[in-house]
Image (cartoon, rainbow, N blue to C red):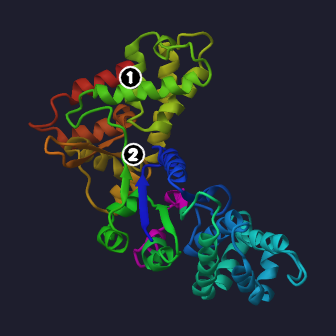
Amino acid sequence: MTCQLYAGHRGAGKSTELLRLQKHLNEQGCFVVYFAADEEDIEPEDAQYTDILLACTRHLLEALKDSASPSSLLNWLKDRWQELKDLALTEVSLEGLSVEAQISQFAKITANLRTEPGQRQKIRERVNPHTITLIEALNQFINDAKKHLPNGYSQLVFIADNLDRIVPVTQEDGRTNHDQIFLDRSEQLKALDCHLVYTVPISLLYSNRAIDVANNYGNAQVLPMIMVQTPQNQLYQHGINKFTELLQKRLNLIDSNQSIVDMFETREALERLCLMSGGHVRNLLLLMKEAIKYTDTLPIPTRALQRSVSELRNTYRNTVFANEWQALAKVYYSKQKENDQLYRGLLFNRCILEYRYLNPEGESQVWYDIHPLIKGIQEFQDAFNFTHHEPGAPSDWKSGATRTKSAYAD
């Protein structure tokens, strides 16, 4: 069995890629169980390993209950029902209930992890001592299901998406909840007897535990930003063209006869919008949506684009703490980041973006930059001028900042 970690900035398109993977694997004879963890199961602001295990159990149970006997899981639940039933907010006895009704009671417990903050810790305290036996029961169910998969399927794959949205919380000992979930519990995460894909926070891959992550899981796959600008701060036309194609495909869902270029006053305005996204798919769509909101008639006027960019730029301004501006200036200057908690936080918040490209030798090269919207913020410009007001500072900085502000000024 394989266990693969998948990371990338939130909103970069990981879910889209995982859904494409699901479709591809289904066509290759793999029965795929996919779920987005933060939609019904976990609270990203307060998540622990037990929450993930219960969510995995619920989704595998619901997806495979017609292919296998759930008796091992239901027996596990019956053995602990007296201490768990109040957490399902019920006085119902499992005895005499149909299989569907018993599964429903299990689902109530997992649902309360997200919807009932007051119950969350109680559920963890009562389930935690029994996670090993729960995994054993779940694997009995999985192995039975693998023998009775629907016709045409020979492998079972489980994909847990959106675990990367779990917010990092630093404990008193300096370690984070990410360490506790993905490292302390790595053996349990890998223990499910099927092929596994977990999304993980990108900041974990650049922490002081990166070697431990690799040792436990192998090399993680990372989905970088689409490169719309080179490390030399030059427009990267190939990436801009890809983003233009993306917008055109979205537009075709509404009007296949409309050209995305014709929706803007000039092609330069469209390309500037792509550049301001930083190669971040969700930011691109958000900027486009907001610009249309401020447009009465097409083409989208420059003023609407300016307002869209300005509002998202203000969001990024509010995200950055006073002690972080100089760190951002260093990243812009060097195209690299330091490996400490401050930089990992900026990476998690998408103030620092990761890019990759293949060099002429075919080797993958990684570099970093700040989000383009930040370049137009006065606090950043002041920090850059203070930190790098010296010979050797990027010759295009002043003109680059001027272009950004003149195109979409606050």
Q: Which residue is mark 2?
A: 351
222 in relation to 50, above or below: above
Amino acid type at image mark 1: Arg
* Quadrant location of the C terminus in the rendered image: top left
Please tell me how crowded label 1 is: few (under 14), some (14-19), or many (20+) other residues with Cα within 10 Å.
some
Disc 1 or disc 2, which is closer to the eye? 1
Q: Characterize the local packing of mark 2: few (<14), some (14-19) or many (20 or more) Cα atoms within 10 angstroms.
A: many
Task: Measuring from the top left, give residue 178's x and y in whole percent.
Answer: 46, 68
- Please state which of residues 202 and 197 is positioned toward the viewer in this rendering: 197
Amino acid identity at mark 2: Cys
The x, y position of residue 223, in whole percent, is 39, 48
The secondary structure type at the circle numbered 1 is helix
Q: Check disc 1 and report the residue beneath it.
A: 272
SS category of the residue bearing label 2: loop
Residue at the location (42% across, 19% down)? 270
| x, y percent for residue 215 | 32, 73
- When asked about the image quadrant of residue 277, the answer is top left
Of residues 205 and 76, the one nearer the viewer is 76
Q: Is residue 410 visible?
A: no
Which portion, as a residue range, is magenta? 159-179
